[in-house]
Image (cartoon, grey):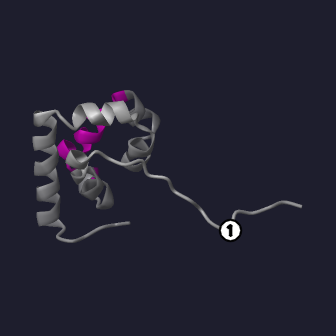
Amino acid sequence: MRLRASRTLIVEPPLPEPLAPLRDLVANLYWTWNTDAASLFERLDRELWQETGHNPVALLQRIPAATLSRFAVDDGYLSTCRGSSRRSMRIYPGHRCV
């Protein structure tokens, strides 16, 4: 007898608060056509970005907490992150794909 899962559980590791705008970017498609927004994910971990097939959801699920902590205090990265998030919300106000 083969058992089937009745539910799917998706575990999302916590993001440091300064990186919260990344969740907004993941939740809409702005990052797919804006190279600055997409580069935010690649900058976190280039190798993992390639391994995940440029999938920011998978990247954020698999990236080490130490890496996130390092970027959470990088002023240049955070500035770019906040700017991309603001632009995405101006273009797609309140729009989330998940």
**x and y percentages locating residue 70 in the rendered image:** 25, 30
**Magenta stretch: helix, strand or loop mostly:** helix
Which residue occupies the foreground of this view, 22 or 70?
Answer: 70
Q: Is mark 1 on a helix, strand or loop?
A: loop
Q: What residue is rendered at 20% in x and 43% in y?
A: 35
Q: How crowded is mark 1: few (under 14 residues within 10 Å), some or many (20 or more)?
A: few
x 34%, y 66%: residue? 97
Q: Report which quarter residue 30 is drawn in.
A: bottom left
Q: In this view, does 96 lie to the left or right of 81?
A: right
| Residue 18 image offset from top left, x and y in percent | 20, 46
Quadrant that contains the N terminus:
bottom right
Q: In the image, is residue 36 part of the stretch drawn in magenta? A: yes
- Extreme residue in the bottom direction: 94
Residue 38 belongs to magenta span: yes
Amino acid identity at mark 1: Ser
**Residue 80 drawn at (x, y percent):** 12, 42
Quadrant of the rendered image containing residue 43: top left
Question: Residue tagged by mark 1?
Answer: 6
Task: Classify the position of the C terminus by image quarter.
Answer: bottom left
Residue furthest toward the right? 1
Foreground pick, 43 / 67: 67
In the image, is 97 to the left or to the right of 39? right
Percent x, y of residue 16: 28, 45
Q: Which residue is drawn at 17% across and 43% down?
A: 36
Q: Based on the displayed image, in which of its 4 quarters is residue 25 positioned?
A: bottom left
- Residue numbers of the magenta segment: 32-46
